[in-house]
Image: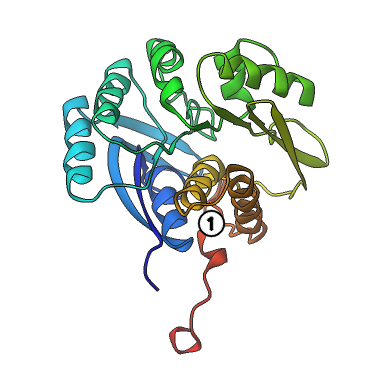
Amino acid sequence: MKPKSKILIIAGSDSSGGAGVQADIKTVTSLGGYAMTAITALTAQNTTGVKSVVPIDPKEIEKQILFTCKDINPDAIKIGMLHSQKVIISVIKSLRKIKTKKIILDPVMVAKGGTKLINRSAITILKKKLIKKAFLVTPNIPEIEILSKIKIKNINDMVKAGRILMRLGVKNVLVKGGHIKSKFVEDVLLSKGQINIFRNKRIITKNTHGTGCTLSSAITTFLSCGKPLKTSCELGIKYVNQAIKSNLKYGKGHGPINHLNSVNLKESFN
């Protein structure tokens, strides 16, 4: 099987393999894409939490992006953890030199265990300058509450907050509703003049580490292959739900999901 598309991932590393760049590479690969990376930070973490975050020099991040893309031009770009103002500025600078239009921004702000992964000045510049470069932004409830400055209690609030983000210049917003406690998880896709709601039964498990990274990478992969946005979101959500259902139970805290759920190995490899 040959990869169907090429994707550049700009994000932080997760030493436990469940989220960040590691989750992104697994997702892109298992869905038939070719993954390239620009690492923004190194983290020491496991399923119980984050021990430390070591930032990569913004100039080195820029070199990773530009030198990679000079040789292999990506069909789409997925952006994850950008922890400081200087890092965001270096990424914006790099994006200006790359022709790729399909840019998916997952505004990672807080780790599953509660550790803050971005500072206040970085949030400000993300809102003012980076968000308008994205084709799609995929915030969860806590993230969109920070970006929109409104409290989210229901689906109407999700729509309202999504529209606030669109006024900042982003073309499309997928608001992930997993943090609202209910029997069903409702994700809301806002595009120009259109609202789509994806409703799925909640899977009861604590093993959901890396779901946000995985979903944005899955959507990026489907988009990079030429699928429409709504279809890409539907397929991405389905992939994540199947990965959660596996309930791997690795680690003592919030365990990872199963990125291999879409892969069927030939009998000779089993």
Whether residue 262 is situated above or below residue 128 in the rendered picture: below
Mark 1: secondary structure: loop
Residue 222 location (% of width, % of height): 51, 52
Whether residue 46 is situated above or below residue 90 in the rendered picture: below
Residue shown at 55% from the left, 59% from the top:
258
Residue 120 location (% of width, % of height): 43, 11
**Do we see residue 146 in this rendering?**
no
Whether residue 89 is situated above or below residue 191 in the rendered picture: above
Whether residue 264 is situated above or below residue 177 in the rendered picture: below
For the residue pair 110 and 215, the one nearer the viewer reads as 215
Q: Residue furthest right?
A: 183
**Do we see residue 32 in this rendering?**
yes
Tell me if 155 is positioned left or right of 231 in this view.
right
Q: How many marks?
A: 1
Tell me if 246 is positioned left or right of 223 in this view.
right
Q: Which kind of residue does numbered mark 1 sit on?
A: Tyr
On the rendered image, what quadrant is the N terminus found in? bottom left
Label 1 Cα crowd, 10 Å radius (few <14 / some 14-19 / many 20+): few
Residue shown at 63% from the left, 61% from the top:
246
For the residue pair 257 and 2, the one nearer the viewer reads as 2
For the residue pair 188 and 150, the one nearer the viewer reads as 188
* Residue at the spot of label 1: 250
Q: Residue furthest front?
A: 193
Residue shown at 58% from the left, 60% from the top:
248
Tell me if 158 is positioned left or right of 67 in this view.
right
